Amino acid sequence: MSKNMFSSISVATLLAAGSLLGQTPAFEVASIKPSEPITPAMVASGKLHAGMKIDGKRVDIGNFGMMQLICKAYDVKTYQVSGPSWLQGAGLAGQRFDIVANLPEGATKEQIPQMLQALLAERFKLAIHRDSKDQAIYAMVVGKGPLKIKESGAPPAAPGGEAPNPAVTGSSSVSVSQTKTGAVVSDGTGKTQKMIPSPDGKSMRFEISGATLAELAEGLTPMADHPIVDMTGLTGKYDVTLEISMQDLMNAARAAGAAVPAAPAADPSKPAEAASDPGGSLFTAIQSLGLKLEPRKSPMTFIVVDHVEKMPTEN
């Protein structure tokens, strides 16, 4: 994952907590600085600072791009945000930020998204409006065959008996550990994802544990030409195993801004592989779970970014 190198900038701002009825709540103190580029050494040493962690009155956001910050603040998916071309195309290669903020006295975790909205408006001059329209989607529904997913067991309890990082506001703390065959990504909420490349390097096996089907649909959306929306009606957390072609994964990474070389041109004298069919590998993988994707139109609310700065204002 490549990122532009920025000199470290440490800034802080004091935002008054709303004391008047109806006033937008704000963080008591917040600092914003560009994230350090993620390196293999950082991952191997366990020093990856990514995700959002809430510890008492302290909110710690690590390695979030502007798109992620907007999605977290307004509780929307990336495909529900439109704005400047740099915002849409920055992806993995764009500037990312570390934010540490304190909750004001009497504030609740449920108010964090509103406080993040205020912070983005104050420091990045974010201005938005909402819009609604019908959107072409893929509805993920239960197929005719048997389901080949199973409900996950309860995640291990943290010290003190509490579940790790209750996801009241989407709190998570990402960690990556290397294995002999691949890597395991954990988000600190009990959801893990093991990635194992095939021996021939043409596909990647994903073994996902503790994920909702809504999370699965969101995770697979970058590999489809329309958003994938969970409409199965299944609300549990599941263990899921599926295999995705490396070509589909590289296309998704390239679209997200990662520095991935372009795929070689296809040889017209040779028959096309299944993976070259748009969505072919993805559709097959989902069908292998006893699910299927159906093209539909669905009303959707969008966040339209009218203005946003690339870097925060100084204190």
Image (tube, helix red, strand yellow):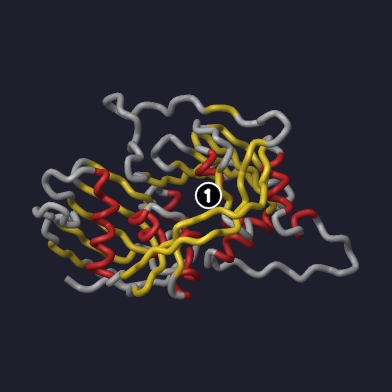
Which residue is situated farthest in the right direction here? 269
Q: Counting other residues with Cα less than 10 Å from the Cα at mark 1, is it few (<14), some (14-19), or many (20 or more)? A: some
The amino acid pointed to by label 1 is Glu
Q: Residue at x 46, y 67 (%)?
A: 82
Q: Name the spot of residue 24 as percent of width and height, x first.
A: 19, 57
128 to the left or right of 31: right
Q: Residue at x 53, y 64 (%)?
A: 256
The image quadrant that residue 87 belongs to is: bottom left
- Front residue of 76/264: it is 76
Which residue is situated farthest in the left direction here? 19
Q: Circle 1 sits in a helix, a strand or a loop, which is it?
A: helix
Residue 291, above or below 283: above
181 to the left or right of 26: right
Residue 173, above or below 2: above
Q: Residue at x 32, y 40 (%)?
A: 168
Residue marked by disc 1: 218
Image quarter in which the C terminus is found: bottom left
Q: Residue at x 13, y 62 (%)?
A: 14
